[in-house]
Amino acid sequence: MSAIQLLAPDLINQIAAGEVIERPVSVVKELVENALDAGATRIVIEIIDGGKSLIKITDNGCGMDKADLEKCILRHATSKIKTQEDLFRITTMGFRGEALPSIASVSRMRIISKPQGAPEPHGYCLYLKQSQTEQIAKVPAPEGTTIIVEELFSTIPARLKFLKTAETEKSHIREYLSKLMLSRADVAYTLLSDGETVLSTQGGQTLDLDIALRNAVGSVYGARVAKSLRKVDLELEDFAVSGFVSDQTVVSGSRQGQNFFVNNRYISSPLLNKAVDAAVSDLVYGGKYPYVVLFINIAYDQVDVNVHPAKREVRFAASNRVFEAVRAAVKKAYHTDTGAGGIVESGLPPGGAGAASLPLPRSLYHPPYAAPELDLQYNNSLASAGAERLPVGAGAPSPQLQPQTPPDIWPARNQHNLHILGQANRLFIIALDGEDLLLIDQHAAHERVIYERLKTAERRKEKQLLLVPKNVEIGQSLNKALLENAETLRQLGFEWQDFGSSALLRAIPLVELKIPVEQFFRELLEELSESAGVRALPEREDYLLYTLACKTAIKDGDILTMLEMTALVNDLLTLPNYQTCPHGRPIITYLGRDELARRFKR
């Protein structure tokens, strides 16, 4: 008997399903994209149990007659491509003809359809189970198509057990639809979960498309982002870049707010991310990213969408030109008259570079006096004697040496016999340990102290109720992170009411904040959203703890007094893990006497 055998059709379909259908959101994606290709202007998505029990998609597209209904569930049966050349001019969301047979092979499925303008009062319903047609029957039906998928993966227990909770699966569906709402703001969408409306948009049938897109951005990312949008518009001979970018003062700590659509198809593209980074490099501080909704309309033969099974990536024929066009279009948006503030010339907020820095959380380390504001603070007999300052280089400002008061604690000695000498570059605490020179990263040190305090059971029970609850605009994108981490966040002291695209924050952990509580909560969710795909659930609580510590610790650039530095070092050295911060970075660097002598060639 031959070792090589032809696979059975149902097994072939299940293999295809493994590539295309990963979880309920994969089913929603394939069916909604089919509806868009059918010309639908209104799509209703209904799910039960996060899509594991039921997914129902209803559209008002062109519909199918009985003959097309019977063909649509055959593998590689499609109306979207006919020749090899069509592969390089793909204008539709789907084209392979694999989705429906793949979904049918791992579920029970019904397809009800009626063509637009059909003379008959009825449509047809096709009943399927594991790709096998059970029957086709006449049924009352509106024009368009309804597809009902039940018992997803019920015949594949191994796949079923890897699905997450209903809430998590629902959040994946909501995230996908949020992207789709941005790419096709002209279409009205409704998402119902267990009978409740989760998402709903008006579409653009009665609105200007720019207004519809702004409304969609507001639904996904909140009103704060929608109000800050700047128009992006650049037309070239062979392609165009259009859409919106947020003002440079409204940014995110992750790239999840950056959305790129090539010929209305959402894609993930490091190339386009870097193009936006290049455009805002002089406007937005490193590690922050503007919200972006950009559409690249390009000749279909200049882009290959057939390079990824789920069509999430594309390849441009002229990637360098696309990069430069996106960079130029975004840069132009920031240098266009806003109508309120005139031409944007820089990314500095009002007040410029000299604006005062945020105050320190003074309740942590109570200072009776101010430290000298020096780049490098140290005790020197020449300073108290009023010696002249020495030049430090042509055109460079000279450090001002001032006597420290009160003089009896300069240099300061802490309880661990370290002499605290001062602060360098508003980042490092300088200390002497015998003959060794120590540099201590003030942010990393404070981060470790806060992290260890938050880890104790007693501190986790502590929380501070907000005098006035804060309404935080988080958008649908961050609502997913909030739902996935809800239990852990509550254990740490957060209390809120969930309203989908916003949350009413009532309490937070007992930590000192130097930024508005709304910004703190939003940035925390951004961190969680960014790490969701790379961190296992057992690590989530620890990650939350050191994210909280990082967000509330003393920052690079904060000026510390001698008493603050002494108290911080004392707190640090009482900990068992004082050598590294919770992220694993070193806190203390030692420069021994021999090392210093070697550097001075002694």
Image: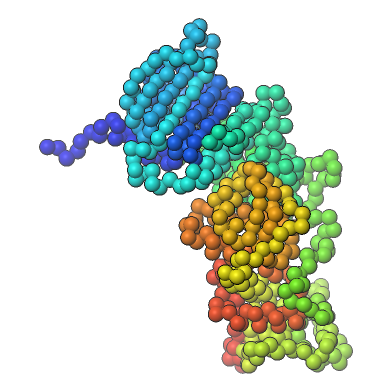
Q: Residue 97: tell me if it is visible.
A: yes
Q: Residue 547: tell me if it is visible.
A: no
Q: Quadrant of the C terminus?
A: bottom right
Asked where in the image residue 467 lies, by quadrant, the reply is bottom right
Q: Where residue 107 sits in the image (x, y, percent)?
A: 38, 33
Q: Residue at x 72, y 42 (%)?
A: 223
Q: Where residue 584 sits in the image (x, y, percent)?
A: 54, 70
Q: Residue at x 40, y 36 (%)?
A: 152
Q: Residue at x 53, y 14 (%)?
A: 116
Q: Where residue 557 sits in the image (x, y, percent)?
A: 73, 69
Q: Quadrant of the N terminus?
A: top left
Q: Residue at x 48, y 39 (%)?
A: 49
Going by the image, does 97 lie left or right of 184?
left
Residues 443 and 195: in front is 195
Residues 280 and 319: in front is 280
Going by the image, does 402 lie left or right of 414?
right
Q: Residue furthest right?
A: 386
Q: Where residue 453 sits in the image (x, y, percent)?
A: 61, 72
Residues 488 and 387: in front is 488
